Image (cartoon, helix red, strand yellow):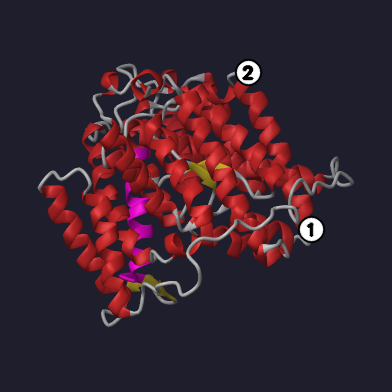
Amino acid sequence: MFEKLFQLSAHNTTVKTEVLAGITTFMTMAYILAVNPSILGTTGMDKAALFTTTALSTIIATLTMAFLANLPIAAAPGMGLNAFFAFTVVQIMGYSWQMAITAVFIEGLIFLVLTFFNVRELIINSIPQTLKDAIPVGIGLFITFIGLQHTGMVTGNTETLVTLGKMTDSKVWIGLVGLLITGVLVSLNIKSAILIGIIAGTIIGIPLGITIIPKEHLISIPPSISPIFAKFVWNDLFSTDMLMVVLTFLFVNLFDTVGTLLGLAAKAGLIDKNGSFPKVKQALFADAFGTTIGAILGTSTITAYVESASGVAAGGRTGLTALSTACMFFIAMFFAPLFLMIPSAATAPALIIVGLFMVSSILTINFDDLTEAIPAFMTMVMMPFTYSIAQGIVFGMLSFVFIKLFTGRASQISITVYVTAILFILKLFWA
């Protein structure tokens, strides 16, 4: 059955590999079950309902990615977008969470239309090859930075922005030991290395007091989503503020998703010899559908998750990986205390190792031609330094256009790239 549904042989993979990859992806992104309710809960939304909604929206979007696109990519409420939802739209701009949810719903509908008419696919296919080569590298640096933060090895500093964390912190040692275990197992070519590393880190955290074993019942009925289900308001539908909020959600979600999909597809070997991503329309539809359904269920924008790279690194190549991840989220709804006990420090080594795998794409960039190398470099460094995949693409695309234009190579710039660059400039000044 799985062979027929997901074409495992054609992708040179097995059921065991795909399932383990799906579990690995789940382990690295399970934090969203705790973090999303925490962030959106600051708006007054019911946190218990948000837990269930986060799981349900992730399951639906990831299953759509599995069966429609046959990709090893999970989708869930996006980090950054949920913060914009809670801290900017609601707390700073002063709008209700119901208004913000309405904006997300409208964004999802717009994305469905843009996907149907191939507008999003056109944008993706117009991205210059040097940027497509750089995007996986930038994502690798980005998720490595996230992993280092989760272990406490890198922490904030008012003078230098970041600095080395305290080596007396237990989380640092969980991360270091987990990284050593994972690194050794990966070097020995053990396919479940990343998953084993996560489990080992979780166990190590028990005596250190980082992994808290739940005292309550492990099995529980998921809380009702009725307090946040379909709570739309339409009185601000045609206001300027609603337009601004919708466009911001559109912009960030579009290019976060574009970057994530291209980066993951490249590492999974799903990019064809012409540099195109054949399944991009199905993937974008899954993303748009997930956002629309997520808004109805009561959560912020759904997007492809960069943590899916851990599953790809573990051998995931088809939708069976995504299906396995979705199944784990379904189980987690009933065993929330068990899954939520996994500390972020235990999953951090997986992100760091995956970052290494993705950075290897730098070998395909032509550094002899600076009109190609500089835009690629800007793409790579701006992702971790701005904490945004989307901003990396923005600065990479703009530098590509201006450098090509002023070095007499305007013929290498397509009309779509010009239009996209103009929109980027407008967005930078408008923001």
Q: How crowded is mark 2: few (under 14 residues within 10 Å), some or many (20 or more)?
A: few
Q: Residue at x 43, y 18 (%)?
A: 411
Q: How crowded is mark 1: few (under 14 residues within 10 Å), some or many (20 or more)?
A: some
Q: In this view, does 55 lie above or below 1?
A: below
Residue 289 percent coordinates (x, y):
61, 32
Residue at left 61%, top 53%? 52
Tell me the number on the disc at residue 252: none
Q: Which one is in front, 388 or 188?
A: 188
Q: Which of 381 and 411 is in front in this view?
A: 381
What span is in magenta? 135-154
70 vs 178, left or right, is: right
Q: Position of residue 23 (x, y in %)?
A: 36, 46
How far separated are the C-alphas under marks 2 and 1? 32 Å
Q: Is mark 2 on a helix, strand or loop?
A: loop
- Image-based side of 48 in relation to 210, left or right: right
**Mark 2 or 1, which is nearer the eye?**
1
Q: Where is residue 313 in the image (x, y as percent from the top left)?
A: 27, 41
Give whichever of 27, 423 is nearer the camera.
27
